Image: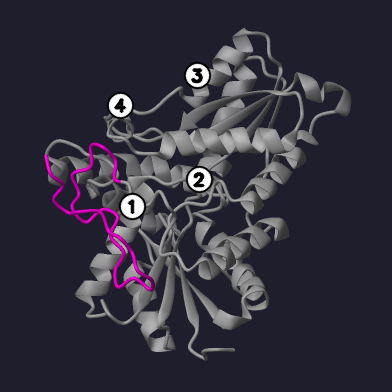
Amino acid sequence: MADQNPTGVVMLNLGGPRTLSDVGPFLRNLFLDREIIQLPAQERLGPFIARRRTPKLQRLYQAIGGGSPLYDWTTRQGEGMVKRLDALCPETAPHRFYLAFRYTEPSSEHALRQMAADGVRRAVAFSQYPQYSCSTTGSSLGQLWRDARRLGLANTFQWSVIDRWSAHPSFVRAMTAKVREGLGSFPETERRDAVVLFSAHSLPRKVINQGDPYLQEVAGTVRDVMRELDEDLQYALCFQADVGPVSWQGPNTESVLEALGKQGRRRVLIVGIVFTTDHLDTLSEIDIEFAEVARNAGITEFHRAPAPNDDPLFLDALAQVVADHLRSGDCAGPQFGLRCHGCANESCREILNPAHPYRQPPLHPQR
């Protein structure tokens, strides 16, 4: 081992309410965040929407066990990842993982304090969103850097960033395996009649129209998985979880299911192509709400491809993504430095105290 100080891998994610009492604060944080949703008079309207939605969301969480399992699944993923990393990359071992959630605990502040206490010097900010978006990965990184400065830890760690990884071959293989597993729910003689419906979390259209790469990266994942699957199946891409008084990217998953029913399609496999763990979007929206929509539309066989969760093949993928990144000597992927054409955030694409030379885009581009 070249260095006894642990290498820290910070797993960035939105988080989810672990108990029913966490739902209100979670929603308030969400609707106050202008990096996710932009509302008029947001300081007043955001908390109002959160209060109105809290009882309904509490009922949904109650139906799936009383809270989000995202923390538990991400913890298992982190444990499996660092165990594999220690074997793959002994030169940077030991590796430790730290959860940094955007709207719930453990927060990025918690992760940074724990890393400092553990003696971490080399750190990787690892977005748990395989496809990049300014509103998810971008906002999580911004919060991480703000917290590090506020805590006086701006120079404590040398950072690099895994900003997107949906095109990594190991991730594509792991997701393809989940699609195959889902297809196994249909009788073999009927499988060719099934429509593979890829469903992704939607984004406000305003974000997409500003040049956010999320839409093209999700479509790229769908293409890569279908190519790896190598089966002559019909497929489509749609979007779910559009909430709040803004215009969202479509087509909406519910409307696509209704249209498939009207077209006489009776078998659908739905794939949460951006979801690496089970949580409300899979366990409630897909398994309960969309299943009912499918039944009412006349779809007689409706199945979901399992989420990766702690599947060993997916844990292999997580470890391989980090191992390849650590060995690359790069601070981020080649696309990270390219701002969206409508970007107005001067701190966008920043890497705090980079571990390797990083050519940051100009803060004040010429106009």
Q: Which residue is mark 4?
A: 247
Callout 2 touching callout 4 (CB < 8 Å): no
Judging depth in this view, the residue of 98 and 3 nearest the camera is 3
Q: Where is mark 2, residue-wise?
A: 280
Image quadrant assignment for residue 19: bottom left
Would you say residue 271 is visible in this rendering? no
Q: Mark 3 or mark 1, which has the lower sequence index? A: 3
Q: Is residue 226 above or below residue 309?
A: above
Q: Would residue 283 appear left or right of 316 to someone viewing this image?
A: left
Say whether disc 1 or disc 4 marks the residue closer to the N-terminus. 4
Stretch of the chain drawn in magenta:
339-367
Residue at the (50%, 19%) spot, across then down? 255
The residue indicated by pointer 3 is: 255
Residue 147 - label: none
Label 4 element class: loop
Mark 2 or 1 closer to N-term?
2
Q: Residue 258, located in which quarter of the rendered image? A: top right
Q: Name the kind of residue labelled 3 in the image.
A: Ser
Amino acid at pointer 4: Ser
Cα distance between the residues tagged 2 and 1: 32 Å
Residue at left offset 30%, top offset 60%: 359
Q: Quadrant of the N terminus?
A: bottom right
Mark toward the viewer: 4 or 3:
4
In this view, the mark in front (3 or 2)? 3
Residue 259 located within the stretch drawn in magenta: no
Amino acid type assigned to the residue bearing label 2 in the image = Leu
Kindly indicate whether the residue at mark 3 contacts the one at mark 4 (C-beta within 8 angstroms): no
* Amino acid type for the residue under numbered disc 1: Gly
